[in-house]
Image: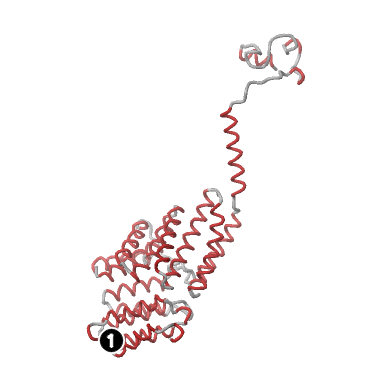
Amino acid sequence: MVALLCEYYEATSHELGLGDDGPGQADPARGPLSISSLPEAYPAVDPLADRVDSVRRSVDRTLAAGSVSPGQLDLLEERLLLSRQEYVSKPPAPMLKQLLIDLQEVEGLAKDRQPASVQVRLAEMTAVLATLIADALMKLGDLHRSRSWYSTARHASDESGNLELRARVRAQAAMLPYYYGPLESAITLAREARIMTRNKPSPTAAFAAVAEARALAQQGDKAVAETRIRDARVIFDQLPAVSDEDAFAFPVRRFLLYLSGAFTALGRSSQARRVQEDALALYPAGTGIDPALLHLEAALCLVHDHSATEACQLAAATYLRVPEAHRTPILGARARRVIEGLPGTNQAAPAAKDLRELLELPSASR
């Protein structure tokens, strides 16, 4: 074999690093090279080549140690879907505890080095859970923490690279400044979401457009708000029906809730009432606070129609009908909007005074 190599390369065995040409070495006349005749020394190992192999082995070990099975991820996503479904009707305080437990498990997996496809799925789960946590905190009136969690949700959605999810998180985050200010932030977030989805009609595109319309109408920018309402309707009419029982879906009843807010702020009370009635017909009993928000929108319509007493009475009745666990600060904030919207001396009317006193009572006294 050595002889063949020497002949092929036109070199001696010494030049090829296979030993001297002296006695005791293989040559064509002496037959094949035996193990006992192999040289005792070989050329030094290339340090770079050794490093290349060492790093490859280390990477292989890391991949093996950090990998999460597809089945494990599927089970996590199933649990997350159940949480999203429960969130539709379950009070925010117990949901907050449940969501934090789910997120801790996802975070534990994300801390380890994972393949890119696994990291993407974990980032998506993190974004969804962080958004729901932020929403629960908003309902509970913890605005500072809610704002921080919405920032975390946006960060996670950006890490996922999922454009639809990035837009959805921003549209959802626009709710906090819509209800609590500043309105300009709500408009900016909804607009960012709309721009991200403008080339692809989707539930998120409709959500972003109608959320922007609602905030613009509340700000008083009627012309652009009307344009966004038309955009949202055109998009939504192209979409298939989606599940009502998913907090991260955008079904008809939720679209109508946002549309109601836009029409109410525009002073189009008759259209707002029709939308509110259509939406309320789609909500079964025990479906969270959305029906109460729609009734409070109806109270605001009564304010615009100069029916101050009826507006305050409807707001008070709506507030009292909500089960204690769901009677969170966000409802109080919306009911106070009814009082704030009353013109002049109407804010001192008996019905307004009763509503104000109701909202100021400790929770256990209501």
Is disc 1 placed on a helix, strand or loop? helix
- Identify which residue, 118 or 46, lies in the foreground: 46
- In the rendered image, the residue lying farthest to the bottom is 350
Compared with 90, 349 (above or below) is below
| Image position of 251 (left or right of 66) | left
On the image, which quarter does residue 190 sit in? bottom left
Query: Is residue 229 visible from the viewing direction of this image?
Result: no
Q: What x and y, as percent, mark residue 211?
A: 34, 67
Residue at the location (53% across, 64% down)? 80
- Identify which residue, 113 or 224, lies in the foreground: 113
Q: What x and y, as percent, mark residue 188?
A: 31, 61
The chosen color scheme is secondary structure
- Identify which residue, 245 or 179, lies in the foreground: 179
Residue at the location (34% across, 69% down)? 178
| Image position of 343 (left or right of 72) | left
Q: How many discs mark residues in the rendered view?
A: 1
Query: Is residue 36 visible from the viewing direction of this image?
Result: yes
Q: What x and y, as percent, mark residue 156?
A: 45, 56
Report the residue marked by disc 1.
308
Number of residues whose C-alpha sits closer than 10 Å to that of mark 1, classed few (under 14), some (14–19) or many (20 or more): many
**Quadrant in which the C terminus is drawn:** bottom left
**Quadrant in which the N terminus is drawn:** top right
Q: Which amino acid does the dot numbered 1 rest on?
A: Ala
Compared with 49, 24 (above or below) is above
On the image, which quarter does residue 239 sit in? bottom left
Q: What x and y, as percent, mark residue 47?
A: 58, 28
- In the rendered image, the residue lying farthest to the left is 344
